[in-house]
Amino acid sequence: MSKGILVILSGFSGSGKGTLMKRLLEKYDNYALSVSATTRSPRPGERDGVDYFYKTEEEFSRMIEEDAFLEYARYVNHSYGTPAAYVDEQLARGKDVILEIEIQGALKVKAKRPDTVLIFVTPPSAEELERRLTGRGTETPDVIRQRMARAVEESESMEHYDYILVNDTVEECVDELHRLIQAQHLQAVHQREFIREIRGELKEREEHRK
Ligand code: 5GP
C-alpha cells in the first residue's frame, strides 16, 4: 500500500475552510483530519478532541518540550500546534491527511517535508470575507478587525502555496478540492512503487526475449 499524501489547507479566518473540510470528510473516503492543540478557548459548539485539543499555556509548553509537534505557531494571541504522532500513523496507513493550519506552520511543514501539498482557500473577494466573519456572530468587532488585519498580512504569502482555491459555492469547491488532492497521487514522487514494478516487468520481458 502506498503512503498517503500530506495536504495543508490554509486560508483567511472566515474563508469557509472549516465547512469545506467537514464536507470533504462526509463526502469522500480515505481522508484523515488532524486535530490540533490550541491555547484558545472553545467557541460555542466546539468540542475538546473534535475541533481542537484545548490546552493551557503550561500544557502547550510541555508538548513543545516533548517534541510532540510537527509544527506550531502563534496566531492572534494564541498558540496552535499539530501533534505529529497521529499524522504519521495515518499517512503510514495510506490515508491522505489534511492539516487545517495557518501560513507560518504551513511553511514550516513544507520545509521539513517538501512533498506536502499546500492549498490556500479564499473567498471570491475581501467584501465577502468580511461579510462571512461578521455573519458568524461569534466574534467581537475587535477580533474581526484583528482577523481582517491578519488577512492582509497573509495575502502577502499566498504565492508560497501550490494551489489557490476560490471557495464560492461549498459543494463545487469540495469536489474541486477532492479532485486536486487525488491528482497529486499521480505525481511521479508518489508513484515510486508503481514505477519500480513496471520497470521490473519490462526488464523481465526483455530478458525472456533474449
Ligand atoms: P481558529 O482560532 O479560527 O480556529 O484558528 C485560527 C488559525 O489557526 C486558523 O488559520 C487555523 O487554520 C490555524 N490553526 C489551527 N490549528 C493550527 C495548528 O496546529 N498549527 C498552526 N500553525 N495553525 C493552526
Image: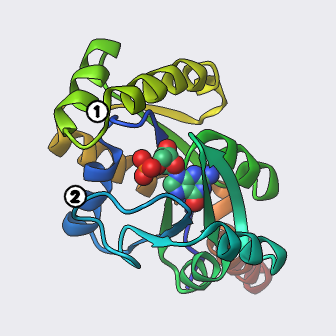
In the image, is residue 150 above or below residue 80? above
Q: Earlier in the sequence, mark 1 or mark 2?
A: 2
The residue that disc 2 covers is 23
Q: Quadrant of the N terminus?
A: bottom right
Indicate yes or no: mark 1 CB to ligand 1 under 8 Å: no
Circle 2: element type: helix
Task: Say whether residue 42 is visible.
Answer: yes
Residue at 55% in and 21% down: 155
Residue 79: quarter of image: bottom right
Residue at 20% in and 68% down: 26
Residue 112: quarter of image: bottom right
The residue that disc 1 covers is 167
Q: Position of residue 80 (x, y in %)?
A: 59, 58
Name the foreground residue: 193 vs 66: 66
Coloration mode: rainbow
In the image, is residue 59 above or below residue 16? below
Q: Position of residue 186 (x, y in %)?
A: 53, 56
Task: Say whether residue 9 is visible.
Answer: no
Amino acid marked by disc 1: Asn
Residue at 31% in and 23% down: 129
Name the foreground residue: 165 vs 38: 38
Name the foreground residue: 150 vs 90: 150
Q: How many marks?
A: 2
Q: Position of residue 111 (x, y in %)?
A: 80, 49
Residue at 64% in and 25% down: 157
Residue 132: quarter of image: top left
Amino acid marked by disc 2: Arg
